[in-house]
Image (cartoon, rainbow, N blue to C red):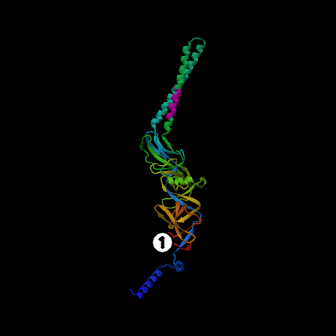
Amino acid sequence: MQPKQKLNRRATLGGLLLLLIPLPACSSPTAEAAEATEVRPTFEVASAKPSDTSFEREYVGEVQAVRYAEVRSRLKGVVESVAVDEGQSVKADALLFSLRASELQQEVMKARAAAKSAEAELKLATLERDNTALLFEKKVVSDAEMALAESKIESLKAKLDESKAITSQASINLTYAKVRAPFDGVVNRIPRKAGSVVDEDDLLTTITDTSEVYVYFRVSEREYLEYTSSKPQHHPKQVSLKLADGSIYDRPGVIDAVESEFNKETGNLAFRARFPNPSGTLKHGSSGKVVIKTDLKQALVVPQKSTFEVQGRLYVYVVDAQNRAKAQEIVPQLRLKDTFVVGAGLTPQDRFIVEGIQKVKEGLKIDVAPSS
């Protein structure tokens, strides 16, 4: 190889080596400029500020009259007359039905006659005992005769008491022929009309007192524990009732009783709410939805649209001081209609992306738009 050719080859290799040497001083300004000119996505960002809020829960309820009674026949006989009509309001002790009770009347007369006979026998035995006592004082009769007279008196007294008890029971049985209202209320269906033969314990009608009503509803074990975990003064007492047509009953009710056992089949627990019903709008056996409103003081609330779920865990994208997005797990305390009440994982100082989280990636730097 010629010397000139060797010189050219060395020059070429030297130039290549120079190209391979990094020039850091020249690259840094270029990267900073690229970052400065980078177009960043803009997202609405908000802070999780504590605020007072409330939520409502609805439970299917069954309406029952505060007093409900089945009126049944207490003897076998024939319905002689019906003194009321279906749907009629009655007062306590008002006559409802009359049953034919000629046999019972005969029993009463027979018992009274037996009582009078026993009373007469007792009087006669008393006179005989008094005469025996006089003879006994004169030592005409023996001690045995005197004791016999006394025992006869005791026997006849017992017989008279028994006759009076039979008379009293017969009189009571006779009162069963007159069926009366047990309390103020409304008469419902009357299946046995006049002339019908009834047996003992046959249903004649029912009476309901709906001046007040109970509404029974069931809550889950989790909701019951939420209810009991709050302080007693914070327990929601006043409730409202949504009727079948969607309207709200115009009078509030109060929760006044909680059942002591969970239903083994459903895992639910029964609550009872009492509602005034002076107009009679609510009827025994009807249904509705009990609406319970619960107030939350200084709760951290985030919109559901700001959250995403990964393997059953809930997250939001929080934004740091350099406006970079970072996934942050939160623990929801309650799920409301379109928000979550945060139990843990977020503080009032944290900022989070409100909307558009499907476009966000971990570490993405954003421009911040204030929340509306």
Examine the rendered structure and indicate whether residue 314 appears above or below residue 322.
above
Q: As drawn, which residue projects farthest toward the bottom?
A: 4
Examine the rendered structure and indicate whether residue 161 appears above or below residue 347.
above
Residue 162: x and y in percent read 51, 28
Q: Say few, some or many: other residues with alpha carbon within 10 Å of mark 1 (under 14 / 14 to 19 / 20 or more).
A: few
Examine the rendered structure and indicate whether residue 113 appears above or below residue 186.
above
Main SS, magenta region, reads helix
Q: Nearer the viewer, residue 198 or 307?
A: 307
Q: Which residues are magenta?
A: 159-170
Residue 365: x and y in percent read 53, 73
Kindly identify the amino acid type of the residue bearing the numbered disc 1. Lys
Q: As drawn, which residue projects farthest toward the left?
A: 1
Residue placed at 47% from the left, 35% from the top? 105
Residue 120: x and y in percent read 53, 24
What residue is pinned by disc 1? 359
Q: Nearer the viewer, residue 110 or 226?
A: 226
How many numbered marks appear? 1
Residue 230: x and y in percent read 58, 54
Secondary structure under badge 1?
A: helix
Q: Nearer the viewer, residue 306 or 146?
A: 306
